[in-house]
Amino acid sequence: MKRYNIEEFGARADGSLCTEAIQQAINACGETGGIVEIGAGTYLTGTLQLRSHITLHLAQNAVLLGSGSMADYKSFDHIQNEWGEIFSLFYAKDCEDIVIEGDGKIDFNGDAFFDYTTPRVEGLDLESLTEAQKNQFVVNFDERPNQLMFFRKCRNVRIRDTAFYNAPCWGIVFSACDEVKITGITIRFGQRIPNNDGIHLCSCQDVIVTGCDIVAGDDCIAVSGIDDWLRESRRIIVSDCILSSSSAGVRIGYFCSKVNDVQVHNCTIYRSNRGICMTACKGGYVKNVVLSGLIIDTMSRAGGWWGIGEAIYISALDHELHHNYRDPYDTVPGKYNIENITVRDVTASCENGIVLAGEHGNIHDVRFYNLRLRFIDAPNRKFFGGRMDFLPGKMEKMVPEGRLYWIYAREACCVKVQDYSIENEITQENLMIEPCLENCEKVFFEPAWPV
């Protein structure tokens, strides 16, 4: 296979901008197919367009560093449904057979776009917050690249073994792509930066994500239809990953996304605002999902994030929208928005338990087997003041003083929890941990013994 070393095209690891030289190497490789080689050293670059039939290989100690100036980022001919004009470090459209690999790393240089000196406290009294809470709020920015590695309508893409750092917004993004495999990568994104999803799969089909280690501010792995509401996301497998997020370890569905056939197996989710999150409303749905072999450890953050330490959050509530979406979406709901969900062999140390929040009976057939919930102290419990968090759903509810719900279910039908145990390690005296059911039908609890 022919090799194209970027230094042969003029790239230098001396702090100078190498965009043009690296793009020339990519273009030449795209003519024949082959390998674009990035050797040891740090190469500064702006937007690069990937081509079909190329392998981008980062050698050990090689770093591709994104520019800290928006002037070095180009938009291209796709308007993303949520973010509008896209500014990426890497993008590919209508391509096939792309590989990104190697022991080097890609640094998206997100810190260059953010101000960490003052937290974005959104109207709260800054003096009322502890230093730990201030450091949990999102940070401020003026402008930033928004889809750092963006694949649109691509097929047969492989990303393996490489490390990715410091994204200022969505990190590795696939939009309407098929046959994607991501294996053994490391992602380290700042946990105070908003919207910096680790891997976001929009309306993709036949995807495997396995053996990855991801830390992010927003969702570590998200499956949605945000960039194409009408194309179903399906046949998605996530396995053997280690995940930590200020939002959700794994998010499945959002608003009117159509998601079908997702499996999440043998993953560890730690210090995350929510472990697993599923949401759908209007004409969207999440169905035929299997979660198994999960270890979940939740930790709520004081500000700017959805969730307050729920191990598993499932919502079919109408969404509170934070964007004006351009593309059409189904507004007429089907019979069920959440359907046929199996959760098996889950052990969770959590600040809050399980939420099933529906309306008009639109959650149907949710089953839990071998569930172990251990409730732990929450440093921010007083900060939230007993309220439940249903975001992005439109709903409010307070938990009575002295109570905590290990499961809260509303407007759900055919819910089964078999072989479960509840352990209370919260130091608050006279705290009762109990289920709360509102307008539910056919709910069955079969605890393990002893409880």
Image (cartoon, rainbow, N blue to C red):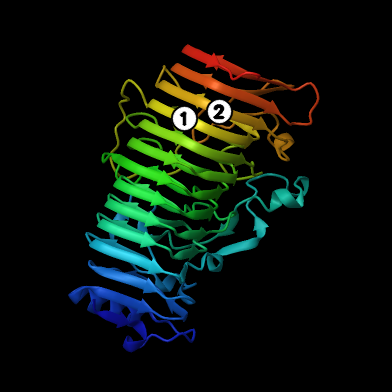
Question: For the view shown, which residue lies furthest in the front direction?
Answer: 449
Rendered residue at 46%/35% (across/down): 292
Secondary structure of the residue carrying tag 1 is strand
> Are dots 1 and 2 in contact, CB under 8 Å?
yes
- Number of numbered discs present? 2
Q: In which quarter of the image is residue 422?
A: top right
Q: Which mark is residue 383?
A: none
Q: In which quarter of the image is residue 119?
A: bottom right
One can see residue 324 in this view: no
Secondary structure of the residue carrying tag 2 is strand
Q: Is residue 174 left or right of residue 212?
A: left
Q: In this view, does 339 lie above or below 196?
A: above
**Sooner in the amino-acid sequence: mark 1 or mark 2:** 1
Q: What percent of the width, then of the height, locates residue 106?
A: 45, 69
- Report the residue marked by disc 2: 371
Q: What percent of the width, then of the height, locates residue 364?
A: 40, 20
Rendered residue at 52%/38% (across/down): 294
362 or 68, which is in the foreground? 362
One can see residue 226 in this view: yes
Question: For the view shown, which residue lies furthest in the right direction?
Answer: 429
Q: Which image quarter holds the N terminus?
A: bottom left
Name the residue type under label 1. Answer: Val
Rendered residue at 71%/37% (across/down): 378
Q: Is residue 54 above or below residue 311?
A: below
Q: Which mark is residue 343?
A: 1
CA–CA distance in space, label 1 to label 2 = 8 Å
379 or 392, which is in the foreground? 379
Name the residue type under label 2. Answer: Leu
